[in-house]
Image (spheres, rainbow, N blue to C red):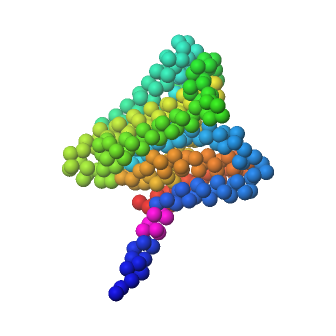
Amino acid sequence: MPNTDTNQLPGVLHAFLRDWRQNIIYIGFIAIFLIFALTLNDRGFLNPNNLLNIVRQTAMIAVMAIAMTFVLSAGEIDLSVGAVAGLASVTVALAVSFAGPFAGIIAGLATGIAVGVFNGWLTTKIGIPSFLTTLAMMGIAKGLAMWVSGTAAVPILSQGYIWWFGGGSIGPIPVLLFWILILGAVGHVVLRRTGFGRRVLATGGGEQAASYSGINTAKIKFRVLVISSTAAALAGMFYAGRLQSGRFQLGEGDELSVIAAAVLGGTSLFGGKGTVIGTLVGAMMIGLINNGLILMGLEFSQQLIARGGIIILAVALSQKRA
């Protein structure tokens, strides 16, 4: 009589290897955390305040990366998110100073929606690739932020706004953590449990096949670009609340970290595959790395080199798992 367990071993081994590749982001996160915990323990890496600061510093990247998961899954890309965050931080600060916090919230979100509609219109109606559309928007948004602010920081004095959008805490837990958890849960459910999420993945997996099956792929791409810019504006509002001011520099360069977080988490650069939970872990991994590099005392130039290595690793993992 054959040994059933022995016969099944190759299949079990194959499943293990397959799951290992899919879960490499979680293994990597734990490994990096342990390495920093062991090597930087004397420099306060494991101090609860330092760990909570990582959450505060990474929250904006995580929020934008959740939306970027939808954009990449649909086969598009958004390079304007960092500049839109800076622009939204300025518009919300100006609106709060003139008309109060509620007007500021409306102004910030309206900024993101307007940019998203413009990006989506150029991409889906005019036919300009999203890479070029959002690359141009990066410069436009930064220029607008510099113009309306006069390149100066715009202070926010509303303590209510500051508490809800970046500066508040419930006990030791920053409010930003609750924002991440809520937005992450919503993003996960929408991508995995709704018809919209399935259409997003189908569009990125094969636009022609999706069109033949009745999916309006242009509408899907338009919507994910609007979602991305709106999330970027929300991140800018968090920046403004945390730093108690709007500044055109806020969000500068974040687009690379946002894309890296999504791709490291398992979202394909080529569309058709995305995971919001993995994206959140990828964002926190980048936060861990940035924090560890600073505690190591590396110069900013050296930190940039390390971050560039993260982007390369993200692309390599995406190609391997796609």
Q: x, y (%) of residue 269?
A: 43, 53
Q: Nearer the viewer, residue 203 or 187?
A: 187
Q: Nearer the viewer, residue 86 or 262?
A: 262
Magenta stretch secondary structure, dominant:
helix
- Is residue 199 among what the camera can see? yes
For residue 46, above or below residue 100: below
Query: Which residue occupies the extreme top position in the image?
Result: 99
Q: Quadrant of residue 175?
A: top right
- Seen at 69% across and 54% down, the residue is 36
Q: x, y (%) of residue 267?
A: 44, 52
- Seen at 53% across and 12% down, the residue is 99
Q: x, y (%) of residue 261?
A: 52, 48
Query: In screen coordinates, is 305 left or right of 71?
Result: right
For residue 61, above or below residue 165: below
Residue 17 in magenta stretch = yes
For residue 229, above or below residue 31: above
Q: Which residues are magenta?
A: 15-21
* Quadrant of the snapshot with the C terminus: bottom left
